[in-house]
Amino acid sequence: MQCVASLLDVRLPQPVLVPIRTKKRYFIPPAVNVKQKTQSEQEDKARAAGVVVRQQYIERAINIACTAGIFDPYVPPEGDARLSTLSREGLKQRTEQLRQSAASQLAFRKIKDHDTEFSTKGFPTVAQQIFIDAHAALTQFDKEKLHSLVTERCYPEMVRGNRYKTLRWRFVESLEPPRVVHARCPDMVSKGNLYGQVTVRMHSRQTLAVYDRFGRLMLGDEDEPRDVLEYIVLERHLVNPYGRWRLHGKIVPAWAPPKDPIVKTLMIPGPKLKPEEDFADLNYQVPKPKAVQWSK
């Protein structure tokens, strides 16, 4: 009995509470009815909490596959394809072109150093075929083939505004043999990163017809071929061993005639119907447009 009493008199040890700090919360929900802090205040608060704020770099991506424009563009002589080389003015234009071809000869040497198959006699035929294939891919909306034939600078210019339209284009014949009239070999980003730009003169006969999404003719005619004089620019990244010549742009001379206007389809608003009326019961006739008198 004494032993049992002695055991009961022994007091058990009391539990000890040890405070342990939990994981620190870096994000605390904002309080209610508190004004929004500025960007600088938020950065200071995050820096005080030990959070590194990532710096935002607002930069434009650089595409080294092609240049951003045409370097030293060719200036076509006024009256080209109209003046004969036997005439006095045509002979002057021809001699002036020969004088200005010194820079092109230097560019030809640099291009031939990187492209051994390049020649001024055979390149115009290759350029004409690239031009035909690129426009054929545009009419068929073949994006993959079009990207392989035109540069990244020329692609948006060709496809802009053609989403809901139907294009009909055809190359009929070549009125004059295409020829190289201009060449430049600029470098970009660093010295030695060369790009070859060659301007080819093409005088051909083509047909073009543009239809809107309703199937109405907007521009041109499929059965009426027209004589077209164009100066196309082809470019190649010479340093890239897998580079190829692609359509880069087109030079439009200042003396070129203006383009034909585009006929757009407009919607003529009809009458306002009441809930109990039907349009078929009104026998509505489209009003004729009123004559507009322009004031001087």
Image (cartoon, rainbow, N blue to C red):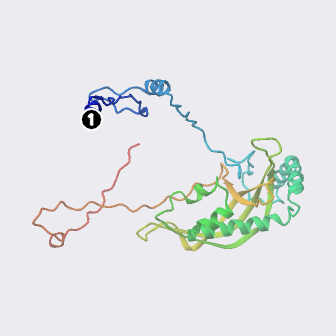
Can I make out residue 177 in this image?
A: no
User: Relative to 124, is 252 above or below?
Assistant: above
Residue at x 81% of width, y 54% of height: 238
Residue at x 26% of width, y 60% of height: 269
The residue indicated by pointer 1 is 4
User: In the visual, does 163 lie left or right of 109?
Assistant: left
Q: Position of residue 226 (x, y in %)?
A: 62, 68
Label 1 is placed on what type of residue?
A: Val
Please tell me in which quadrant of the rendered image residue 122 appears: bottom right
The quadrant of the image that shows the C terminus is top left
Q: Which residue is nearer to you in this view: 104 or 220? A: 104
Q: Position of residue 55 (x, y in %)?
A: 56, 33
User: In the visual, does 224 lie left or right of 84?
Assistant: left
User: Relative to 10, is 211 above or below?
Assistant: below
Q: Position of residue 176 (x, y in %)?
A: 76, 67
Question: What SS does tag 1 mark?
Answer: helix
Q: Position of residue 152 (x, y in %)?
A: 64, 55
